[in-house]
Amino acid sequence: MAYRQTDKVAARLADTRRSILDAARDLVSEGGFAAVQMAEVARRAGVATGTLYRYFSSKEELCRQVFREVSAHEMGLLATIATGDERARTRLAKVLRTFAGRAVKGRRLAYALLAEPVDVNLAEERAFFRRTHAEIFARILEDGIEAGEFPKTNVRIAAACIAGAIPTALIGPLAPQSHELDSEPERVVEEIVGFCMAGIGAAPAGKAKDGTQRRATA
């Protein structure tokens, strides 16, 4: 009986923690990390503010965990594409398009992750996120070079350039005051894909701007 009760308590604690993280994530999606106030997180999660602090000792700790969870989810999606069975050229274009496309669709959350001014703890998480992103690109580039799909290059430098180019290109369009994505969000995505593919000497694979299927050359 005592063991079953312990399981119930553990499950309840886990559910409460999940509710807190979900509430904080919603606030980030609405107004960035600056919008995360502990009292409001507690209210949305349905717990007392004092209870909230038993799970997360500070706003910084809570925001850092939100950043980690969201980033890990996004990187997991990209890593799954990157390790697929398709040609390296196709995988690279898909990873680029997925990253930029998801950022455009969830623009406020993406801006918070990529560009919002943050404290040193979140800056460290952002740097780790960028390195992980570059590692995904590096694996695809290595595959493509080995298969003769991409010209030989310094993989680490090329991957770091791509990983840096995407968030830099998105900062302006994703900014809360920007209206660039209001009319043609797909154009922004495709221009990013095209630039990065051209940067490694490969034509982008997938749909062209006019919606037709683009044929990639080997």
Image: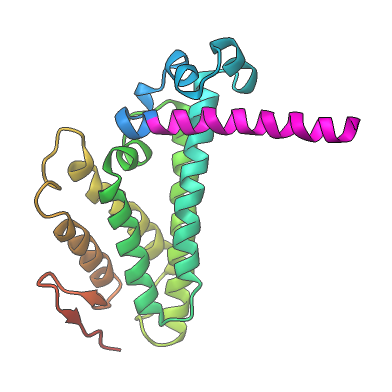
Majority secondary structure of magenta residues:
helix
* Horizontal side, residue 101 vs residue 85: left or right: left
Q: Position of residue 183 (x, y in %)?
A: 9, 51
Residue drawn at 30 percent across, 49 percent down: 103
Q: Nearer the viewer, residue 177 or 199?
A: 177
Residue 23: say if magenta: yes
Residue 121 visible from this viewpoint: no
Name above or below for residue 51 compared with residue 212: above
Q: Which residues are magenta?
A: 1-26
Q: Position of residue 108 (x, y in %)?
A: 28, 38
* Horizontal side, residue 51 vs residue 124: left or right: right
Which residue appears farthest toward the front when viewing the image?
Answer: 1
Applied colour scheme: rainbow
Q: Nearer the viewer, residue 73 or 139?
A: 73
Q: Quadrant of the C terminus?
A: bottom left
Residue 139 visible from this viewpoint: yes
Residue drawn at 11 percent across, 55 percent down: 184
Q: Position of residue 101 (x, y in %)?
A: 28, 57
Residue drawn at 25 percent across, 84 percent down: 216
Q: Nearer the viewer, residue 48 or 148?
A: 48
Q: Quadrant of the N terminus?
A: top right
Q: Position of residue 123 (x, y in %)?
A: 44, 34
* Horizontal side, residue 157 vs residue 100: left or right: right
Q: How many marks?
A: 0
Which quadrant of the structure image shows residue 144?
bottom left
Q: Nearer the viewer, residue 64 or 52?
A: 52
Residue 107: say if magenta: no
